[in-house]
Amino acid sequence: MTGALDDMGAMREALQLAAQAQAAGEVPVGAVVLKDGVVIGRGYNAPISGNDACAHAEIIAIQAACAALGNYRLTGCTMVVTLEPCVMCSGAILNARFSRLVFGAHEPKTGAAGSVINVFETAALNHQTAVTEGVLAPACRALMNGFFQGRREVIKRTTTPLREDALRTPDARFSDLVDWPYTPCYTTEISVLNGLRLHYVDEEVRAVTAAPIDVDASGRHGQGACLLLHGAGGWGYQWRYWIEALRARGQRVLVPDLIGFGRSDKPKRVSAHSPAFHAQVMAGLVAALGLSQVRVLDASGGLGAYLTRVHADVFPRSASIEVSRVGAQTVASAPFPDDGYRAAERAFAAAGFFDDDVHVSSDKKRVGEAIRMDAMRPDGEPSERAAALAFLDAFLDA
């Protein structure tokens, strides 16, 4: 049949449904039912939103398929699901007379297709369903792992004690960020933090399926990692229009909120800040993530260049980005204006905070004139955006 889906094609559609479950706060499991390669039923996990313990992806997909065929029997159909079914869903698959079950990742705690028990190998049952396992398993497993890692981070965030000499902005202040779909990550385990909580975003390389102006489809840069340092008047959100362009160019992207800014803890005293302290935090973060040879894009006014001097083995190259105060997140408009933030801003603004000989990266001359942060805005001047993308290419090629 023209356009009929094979197992991998169906699993890709199931993964898209699983992503919808995740967006709704549900465990990310998606399922589709195929009849002669055509999808006749779709479902994703919804027990929480529906207050229904039975609202698993497979059950919802079965209900949709039965309605589509006008029959409670689904003989000749294939169930494709991202996660190994539980006992309930396995029983429903058998009762509906599915010919095949295809699943992605194993479920070691509740899986009923081989991980804990295998109801499909029970010869005494009056129907047998063939099982194919492991289709797109890495992608299915990664989705589950990312979801539960996010949950663990939420738990860790809500249980991390706050030092008496620091402040922490409530999460609710960041709930309505525009163009910021990234999962927050936190750590207190870098020794120099001494109990302070550091927030950062860690985005892997993006798969490229098209080639608009912000995508390097040639793969010429290879894969690497970039650290994006925000300006002293702002926080990591300033980089929201740069992250995807870098990911599309084969870069893993780290965007921290420096201590004193954004979602990171904010010591109340100016004396808590020094270039050496912030450099040690960044070096510790990169080491904790197992990275090396990380390029730095710097809007802080000098920390990137400082890193390339004192930690040249880890940060071999940096380039400066200019941040205009117009439209920047300042004390008046940031979601975190408090004494801790003001202390950090005063420290970074102080004359001589960064040594004069490292205030501007030497690489800036090799990649051309400094680019403004807002040049990457999608609604900005096309020529400025094109120049910013050319700047990135030159920086990554250097």
Image (spheres, rainbow, N blue to C red):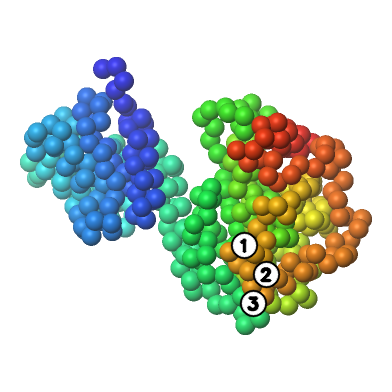
Q: Are marks 2 and 1 in contact (CB under 8 Å)?
A: yes
Q: Can the viewer see residue 327?
A: yes
Question: What amino acid is labelled 1 in the image?
Answer: Ala
**Which residue is identified by label 1?**
334
Using a 10 Å C-alpha cutoff, classify the residue at mark 3 as few (fewer than 14 neighbours), some (14 to 19) or many (20 or more).
Answer: some
Q: Which residue is mark 3?
A: 166
**Residue 115 badge:** none
Splitting the image into 4 quarters, where does residue 109 fall?
bottom left
Amino acid bearing label 3: Ala
The residue at the point 28 percent across, 58 percent down is 48
Callout 2: SS: helix
Indicate the amino acid at tag 2.
Answer: Tyr
Residue positioned 31% across, 44% down in the render:
30
Q: Quadrant of residue 359?
A: bottom right
* Label 1, label 3: how far apart the Cα atoms are: 18 Å
**Contact? badges 2 and 3 (CB < 8 Å):** no
Left or right: residue 171 versus residue 272 is left
Position of the N terminus, as image quadrant, is top left
> Which of the numbered marks, if any, corresponds to residue 341?
2
Left or right, 335 with respect to 308, comes to left
Q: Residue 220 placed where, x, y %?
A: 68, 29
In front: 212, or 157?
212
Mark 1 crowd level (few <14, some 14–19, many ≥20, 10 Å Cα): some
Considering only order in the chain, which callout, 3 or 1, is on the residue closer to the N terminus? 3
> Which residue is at a point 37% across and 40% down the rendered structure image?
15
Q: In which quadrant of the rendered view does residue 338 lie?
A: bottom right
